[in-house]
Structure formats: C-alpha cells, structure tokens
Image (spheres, grey):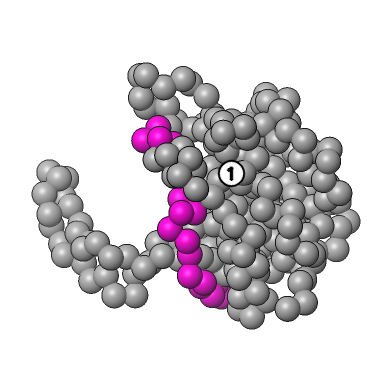
Amino acid sequence: MAFPSHAAIITAAGSSERFQTSPNHLRRKKEFILLDDRTVLYHAVEPFLSVPGLQAIFVTHPIGLHDETEVALDNLMFASKIPIYLVEGGQSRQESVLKALELLESSALQVSYVAIHDGARPWLTSSLIINTLATATVFGGAVPVLVVHDALKRIDEHQCLSEHLERNNIVTVQTPQIFSYPKILEAHRHAIINTQKAYVDDTEIFSDYGGMVGTVEGVIENRKITTPSDMEVTVVRHRET
C-alpha cells in the first residue's frame, strides 16, 4: 500500500488513579513504569516510528510532568528523525486529545490521518498500526476490535443479575484509533461544546459527528495497563517472549 501522511497522538495525561489503588504499589504514573529497560510509554510510542508516512508524534502529559515525560521517552526524543512534541494535557482525556489535534494544526504539517493511542498500551505492533491505517483510508476511521467470548450480563443496584445480554455483534475496542485528520479535528471541536455527554473514546466522538469507523482484528496482547495486576501480567508476558 501507499502509506498516507499521518501523525500520532499518544495519550499519557491521565492521573493513573485506578493503577494506584494498591497500598503496596509505588504511587507512580503507570506510563513511567519500566518494562525491562524501557518505560511503558516508550514501548507505546516506538512502534509508530517504523511506519512509513509518519510526520510527527504528539505525547500528552499531566501538568507539571513535562520533564518526567521527556525522561520516560529516553532517546526517542532526540535520536528519531520524526519530531516528537510534548503536549500539556487538559482536565480530561478528551481535552488533552483536542489540544494535541490543535497543536498539529498549528504546526502546518501536511497530514491526512491521525492515530490516537493509549500510552498505557505497550504491546502495540507496527503491523496493527498499518492494518488500522489501511482500513481508515477506506472508511475515514478505523479501530482494532476483539470479539467478546464471555457471556454478558447487566447488574442492578444490588449487584444482582438483572438482564442477560446478546453478545452477537458485540466487540471490545483497542487503540490505535485512526481517523481522517480534518474530520476528527472538526468532530472534537463540536464534541467539546457538548457538555451534556461524556464520551468514552474517540470513535464515539467521530461517529456522533458523521464519521464511519471500520474495524480490524485486534491483538489480545495489545492490552491496556489499568491496575497493578495488569502490570504484573504484562511483565510476566514480556519476560516470556
């Protein structure tokens, strides 16, 4: 395929609150934890650099953690020919992504697509990026998905089963989520005004404002680190490979 020009936004501006629920765990951002000799954030960013057509990477970070984020990226900040920009995040993930999208606009880089990826997903592969990008060129947007195999139930306020849900055509979604850059920028600008709705992810924003999102087969290893137990499983898997 001919690779379209694109940029990547890596989201790492969250507070990692759920990751810090364990009293025995050091209070650190999960993206800054080491997997062997590199941070989770480093592993999340690095695969994008091997995809042709990449013009820039924007990494969002919490207020006051610019220097720590730069350290977490190690030599990627300076050894790569692709520019990497650090973006101070907003009050929510949605605000942080919009800030990165608007910084991309002000950079005057000519890009057709933008990939948005969780900084806490260190098991990303370049092949998954390429497959998702290819699908985005067809539909305007694309996301990796996994088929749900477990039975789905709804619970009530007493934590008892209240409804048995049909799982056909139900999937879970991963990142990177890749979109036509002009369309996702416009959708985010509309969505930030809609204060009545809390958006789950960027595919929801894109769909709400007229975008179509195709799907590609996700990778089960491309898990998101959310709690300390996720980190322990990830470290074990990393050592086994």
Within-10-Å neighbours for mark 1: few <14, some 14–19, many 20+: many
Name the foreground residue: 172 vs 96: 172
The residue type indicated by label 1 comes to Gly
Q: Residue at x 54, y 75 (%)?
A: 214
Pick the quarter of the image with the N terminus: bottom right
Q: Residue at x 78, y 48 (%)?
A: 103
| 125 or 174, nearer to the observer | 125
Horizontal side of residue 78 vs 238, given as left or right: right
Identify the residue at horizontal 86%, vertical 58% (top origin): 109
Residue 29 horizontal side relative to residue 151, left or right: right
- Residue corresponding to mark 1: 119
Residue 76 in the image, given as x and y percentages of width and height: 76, 40
Question: Looking at the rendering, which quadrant does residue 157 occupy?
Answer: top left
Report helix, strand or loop for mark 1: loop
| Whether residue 57 is situated above or below residue 210 in the rendered picture | above
In this rendering, the answer to whether 241 lies above or below 65 is below
x%, y% of residue 73? 70, 36
State the extent of the magenta-drawn residues as a range: 212-232
Image quadrant of residue 177?
bottom right
> Residue 37 appears at what percent x and percent y?
62, 32
Q: Which is more toward the observer, 181 or 29?
A: 29
**221 relative to 79 in the view: left or right:** left
Q: Residue at x 16, y 65 (%)?
A: 164
Magenta-colored stretch includes residue 219: yes
Residue 39 visible in this rendered orientation of the protein: yes
- For the image, the number of numbered tags is 1
State the residue lying farthest toward the front.
Answer: 240
Residue 89 in view in this figure = no
